[in-house]
Image (tube, rainbow, N blue to C red):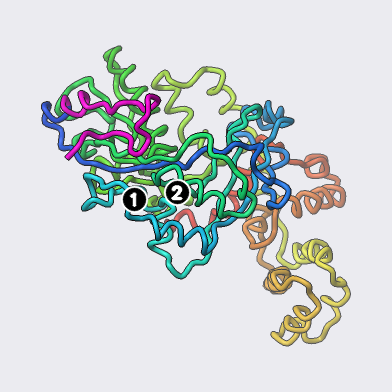
Amino acid sequence: SYPAGRHIRDSDETEPPSIGLALTLDRLGFPLGRLKTGTPPRLLSNTIDWDVLSKQYSDIPPPPFSYLNIEKGVKLQDSLITCSQTYTNEITHQIVRDNQHLLPSYDSGNGNGIGPRYCPSLFKKVERFPDRDRHVIWLEPEGLKSNLVYPNGLSGPFPLDVQTKIIQSIKGLEECVIAKAGYDVEYDYIDPRSLYHTLQAKQITGLFLAGQICGTTGYEEAAAQGIIAGANAGLQSQNRRLITIGRDEGYIGVLIDDLVVKGTNEPYRMFTSRAEYRLSLRQDNADIRLTRKGYDYGIVSKEREEYLKLREKEIEKTLHILSNVSLPRLEWSNYGKHIISSVSFQNEELDNNPIQNSDEYIDSINNQLDNNKKIVYVSTYLAMRQKDGKHKNALEILSTPNIYLIDLIPVINEIGIKTDNPILKDFNISLLVYDTIEATAKYSNYIDQQ
């Protein structure tokens, strides 16, 4: 056995492993294990042939993480970085296979190491998927003024000369120079079942743990734990009640519950499939689910809580309007016909075709379309033409597949003009609540079933 730490990069720049911390945790009775992670080499941007690579542009405009910025936008939206895409090839894979004997032996995984299953090293990808003749590589500049590039998908601890051969076998990187070699880290972690849902250690009151030491990967999973562990450490120091997040409240709650109840034997990653309430755990309602709870525990500002109230009021008002615009199906279908007309067929054809309710008719329309997905519009229209007199409100119409707010708003405005209703005539939806309103309607038929 050997202490946890970095491999391959045995130079003066290499950080020594934190042996003392692991020994202390072991002495205190924490059950320990070993996991592995890795990072790719860093490349010099000016040695990459960017012109031969396909570009991956940023979203324009970039969506903000918080509704606090939904109207004013992202501060650095004029300083976006463009990434590029390239691929490994059979030459790359052969270099990997020819040099696998040079990979380090690890303390975990029978000498192979236990790394993240869903972010495998290049060697693991070549080993696991021998039928694949290429793997995608994303070239990500590390900063606006940095000359370093992160080649996402090329992690591994081969010797520097082998890493150079691997890099230079890839399109666009034939003359590329490695600034820093890639390496692996094998690290100690505690069995997270030795923690409470607050991330406080069961053995030691006041000790909170978060991150890879709890058996997760070191990305969003580690950051999520840091929020809870950090908040609770502060609350504990003030003798206040500690915060926990339930599985129905957020993905943080799912992650922590999985860890402290089930444990893990590999670096844990969060997936939507792990959450029973994933239809409710959406980005458009994260503030509604968690902001008030954060405010109650003193970790969210009054300003943000007031902004939540503003958003909730706007959501309530908009949902009230939509739920009170109600028409018979046949009348909605007349408006629906207007929506469908943008899909490149004539309204008259829908009204006058004698076989409009048959599969033959739908097939005949489908033959006219450039995109077969548009047939859904026809099916939606025909379904709404059922002459049973049943009323539907605008929220129910919005829940229909392939009908969106961008389609519905002008229809409501038209209804307002015809009925001389000033509220509907001028109806629009603020960016502050747009996504939440649409998602609420789309998921409404499924939420009760989850």
Mark 1 vs 2, N-terminal side: 1
Q: Kindly identify which numbered label has been placed on residue 162.
A: 2
Q: Secondary structure at mark 1?
A: helix
Rendered position, 133 above or below 153? below
Rendered position, 25 above or below 346? above
Report the Cα–Cα distance between label 1 and label 2.
Answer: 9 Å
Q: Kindly identify which numbered label has been placed on residue 37.
A: none
In the image, which residues are magenta? 1-24
Q: Is residue 135 left or right of residue 199?
A: right
Task: Give the residue at x 12% y 26%.
Answer: 28
In the rendered view of the protein, which quadrant contains the N terminus? top left
Task: Give the residue at x 72% y 41%.
Answer: 60
Task: Give the residue at x 83% y 44%.
Answer: 425
Q: Is residue 45 magenta?
A: no
> Residue 149 at what x, y percent from top left?
58, 38
Q: Quadrant of residue 183?
A: top left
For the question of whether residue 311 can be seen, the reply is: no
Nearest the viewer among 240 and 370 is: 370
> Residue 391 at what x, y percent from top left?
67, 62
Nearest the viewer among 143 and 28 is: 143
Q: Is residue 105 left or right of residue 138?
A: left
> Residue 254 at what x, y percent from top left?
36, 43
Q: Kindly identify which numbered label has been placed on residue 102.
A: 1
The disc labelled 2 sits on which kind of residue?
A: Val
Dominant SS of magenta comes to loop
Label 1 close to label 2 by CB (< 8 Å)? yes
Rendered position, 241 above or below 2? above
The disc labelled 1 sits on which kind of residue?
A: Leu
